[in-house]
Each structure stands twice: as structure tokens, then as C-alpha cells.
Image: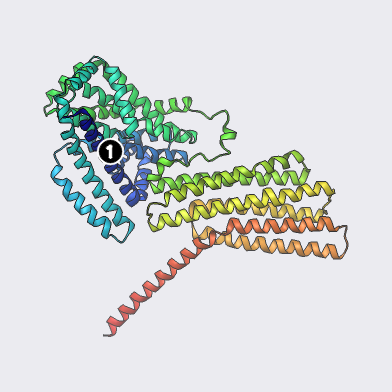
Amino acid sequence: MDATFVLINLLGGVALLLWGLRMVNTGVTRAFGRELAQVLNFSLRNRFNAFAGGLGVTMLLQSSTATALLTASFAGKGLVTAAAGLAVMLGADVGTTLVAQVLTFDLSWLAPVLLFVGFVRHTSAKTTRAKNLGRISLGLGMMLTALKLLVMASEPIRDSSVAQFLFSSLSDEPVLTVVLGALLTFVAHSSLATVLFIVSLATSGGIPLDVAFAMILGANLGGALPPILATMNGDVASRRPPFGNLICRLTAVILVLPFLDVVIPEVAALGGDTTRQIVNFHTFLNLGLAAVFIFLIGPVGRLTEKLITEKADASQAAQRPMHLDRAALESPQLALANALRDTLRMGDILEGLFRDFKGAFETGDKLKLQQLKEADEIILDFNAGVKSYLTELGREPLDDEDERRSTEILTFASNMENVGNILLLSMVEMLERNGQQAVNYSKDDIADHNALFEQLLENMKLAFNLLISRRSTEALNLIQRKQAFRDQEQQAVQRHLQRLRENKGVDDASSALHLGLLSDLRRINSLITEFAYPIAAKKKREKSEKVKKESGKSAKTEFKEQH
């Protein structure tokens, strides 16, 4: 068979395998992502639970990279230490080997069934979760079909003298073979796909067993790289677990590679054909890795903390979005968590700008005013980044809860940009005019300013907490504080007008600027509390529906008793 035709068939089979993996991964994360995240979070109580949680979640997701990104997200929130995150990833590594064990059995008869059921389910489903169940079935069917295609496409390699010469040459270059396996895995972004590809080549006799084993080592090493790249721009805590996983895998490769000639006969002695020997080696490697490092996660975690520290330019890095990782868009819950983190960072920056404005208002510092004006682009970049990220997420169907959460974050980020515009354009310009016109506020006006500033900053903190918790009690509290702020602002206006009527040292210039400042503060307070209303209304609606349901049950019970 023509070599070009063989290569095209191999590439097609690999592409179908990767697409099937992607469909299973996205289907599971979109259908059960919230539950899986809760399971993973619940399992972080100790190293063994964390290991089991990582193993179970990865078997469902069929991707240790997806589990690594979930773990990095928890670490970034401060919920996972480097050691606990490493235990999760050790479990994830073992989980992929068990999936490989299952998929290398002859399940080709199941492929058409899964494809048919998945197609019917996906096209006829009325809900997002049902559609995703169809997506999972389609993905599994594609993976099984792809494995059959790969075995068929790789059979001509066995009879190719050129291919045999190349692979035989690799037998004498184990380090090069490991690097080749790592590169294939890095390009595919899936150690599972690489392992299955290696198995298909070895099964047809295309590559010698020692080359296959060395490539398996490379696949395990390369599988640790995608999570590191995905979290490279994240905070320090989120980068440590993937880096710790790389240290463990690299150590395993270094220790096992020199003894491959000893390992291969030992694995063969356990029985099984070539396929089973390769996947058994893959499984034993990761089980041994977990058995050793599960007791060393503390030292390895401390090592990652020493190696990965805060960047010297952390202050500059904090001025741009850091968590909007496109790879996380496969998991709506992870993507929403990333968008939330950068939205909160945007809010923290705005809070700092408010405090700087308050300081400039009190001291008349012109340099600080200029710095405030230059900060406008920072807020715009944050909002544009979050909006683009969530828009891309919304191109795939989301369930109702994720859709509401996305809308909340988008609304809050847009409101924060509007707050920034009021602060950095209107209020800073007003303060500059203060300096140009040498305006002097009365002591009473300054006292009103300071009181409203403090109340506004307090409301802003409560708004950030509400965005995280979404509790109706906090939403109602924020709405009440909004009204209290409005009342306080109206009283400040009335007191000022009274002083103006009594001509108590208030000139027209200071009066106009003072009233303009109060108006801007009121507008900002409305923007930061606006999103509390849907949260409070949702709880009220749920309570009303519950009352109706209970009253309906009572009515039915009463009717039965009467009749």
C-alpha cells in the first residue's frame, strides 16, 4: 500500500480518536461538571480521598488534563494546597490507565450501537443534559471506531522495510524514543490518545515492544506538560500542582528507563498479548508512581512552593486578566470559575482606585490623579477579556444554572466598567477642576463626602461577597444598604442646600462640584448593587412556588378526606 495513503489513514484515525475524546470530555463536563467539581472538592480531606477523587473524576472525563485544570482552579481559590493537588493528580494519572485498559478490549461491536444511540439521543433531546448524554455516547462510539481504524491502517507498516528500519533504529535510542512519545502526547494534548495509538501500532507489529514501552514512558512525561502550559499565566497556587506532577513523572521516567530491558520480560511473564503487556506496563508505572509519591506529597509540595514563587513583576501582572484560559472552556464550571476570579480581581483594582481617589481628594495630589486617569485602560481590558471569554463559552449550549451564572458575571463586569468610567473620567475630571479653580469645600461637605465614600466601599465589598455566595439574605441586605445610601445622599444634598440658602461660606463653584460628586457616588452605588435584585427575586419566586406546591398538596389531601 502506498505510504502516503497509510499516513492519511493513520492521521484520520488519530483525528477521529481525539475528536471522540473531546466529545466525551465536553459531554461529561457540561452534563455533570458541577457534580464532579463537588466530588473533587469533597475528596480533598486527606491524601487518600484526594487520590480516589482524582481517579474517579478522570475515569469519567477520560482526561487527566481536565482533572488537572479543575484542581488548579481549586488551588487558585486557596481551597487546595500543593500537596493535596498533587494527590489528586496522582489519582488522575492512574485513572487514565484504567480507561486505557477498558478501551483496549475488543469492543468494536459496541461502536455502531453507541453511535446510533448517541445520534438519536442528541437530535431528539429537549434538555441540555440529555443532549450531552448523547454527545458522550457519540464520543465513545467514535473512539472505538477510531481504534479499529488505527489497527487496520497500521498493518501495512509491519511489511514496510523503511518503517521497520526506522523503528528498529529507535530501539538503540531509548532517550530519543521517550522524547518522541512526549512530543506526540504534547501535540495531541492527551496521554490516553497517545497510548492507544502506540498500542494500535504495536498490535499490528509496526513497532517493536521495547520501542513501545519507551514511548509509553514518553507519553506519561508529555501528559504532564499541557496542564503546566494551561496554568502558566495563572497565579502561583494554581501552577504548583501541575508542576509537582511533572516532577513525579520525570522522576519515574529517569528511574525506569535504564531498566527497561529488565522490566519488559517481567511484564511479559504476567501473560497477555502485546496489547495487554503495553497497557499493563502503563498501569503498573502509574500505580508504582502513586504508591511511592503518595507518601512524599508533602516534600514535593514544599519543593514546588520553593521553585514557584511570586513573580518580581507581580504588581504589573495583577493589572491584567490572568485566569481566562481558553483550554478551560471545555468545562463550563471551570470557565465560569475563571471568569469569576478575574471579575473579582477587576473589582479589587477598582476598590484600590477608589481609595486612591479618596486620598487625592483629601490631599490634592496631582500625580495620583494622573495615575488614576491612566488606569482607565486596565478596567476596559478586564471587562473586554471577561466578556469575550464568556461569549465564547456561550457558543455551546449551557444548562439553565450555568447560563444564569454567566449572565450574572457578565452583568457585574459590565457594571464595574461603568463604575470605572464614572470614577476615572467624571470624578477625576471634577477633582482636577477643584485644583484649577482652587475650590474649598466646607467642613460639613467634606464630612458628608467621607461618610458616603466609606459606605460605598463597604457596599462594594458586600457586592463582591454576594457575587461569590449568591445568597438571598446577602442580596436583600445589599438592597437595603442601597436604599440607606440613597437616603443618606439625599440628606447630604438637603443639608448642603440648606447651607447654601443660609450663605454659610458656600460658593457656586464648590456647590456645583459637591452636588456633582454626590450624584456620581449615587450612580456608582446603584451599579454595584443592581445584580442583587435578580438573586433576591429568584429566592422569592422559589419560596412562592414552594408555598403553592404545599398548598396544592394540602388541598388534595383535604379533598380526599372529604370524599
**Could you tell me the amino acid type at mark 1?**
Ala
Q: Is residue 165 above or below residue 345?
A: above
State the residue at coordinates (76%, 59%).
515
Where is residue 302? Give x, y as percent: 44, 27
Q: How is the image coloured?
A: rainbow
Whole-percent x, y for residue 174 in the image: 26, 17
Q: Is residue 199 above or below residue 26?
A: above
* Quadrant hosting residue 548: bottom left
Q: Is residue 222 left or right of residue 507?
A: left
38 or 173, nearer to the observer: 173
Give 394 or 525, whichever is nearer the viewer: 394
Q: Is residue 309 left or right of residue 112?
A: right
Residue 480 visible within the image: yes
Q: Residue at x 15, y 25 (%)?
A: 158
Q: Quadrant of residue 91?
A: top left
Q: Residue 480 appears in which quarter of the rendering?
A: bottom right
Using residue 487 as the reference point, say whether residue 315 is left or right of it.
Answer: left
Residue placed under numbered mark 1 in the picture: 15
The quadrant of the rendering that contains the C terminus is bottom left
Q: Is residue 539 above or below residue 27?
A: below
Give residue 363's position: percent from left, percent from top.
78, 43
Please say whether residue 252 is visible from this viewpoint. no
- Rendered location of residue 21, percent (x, y): 28, 41
- Looking at the image, the residue that sits furthest to the bottom is 563
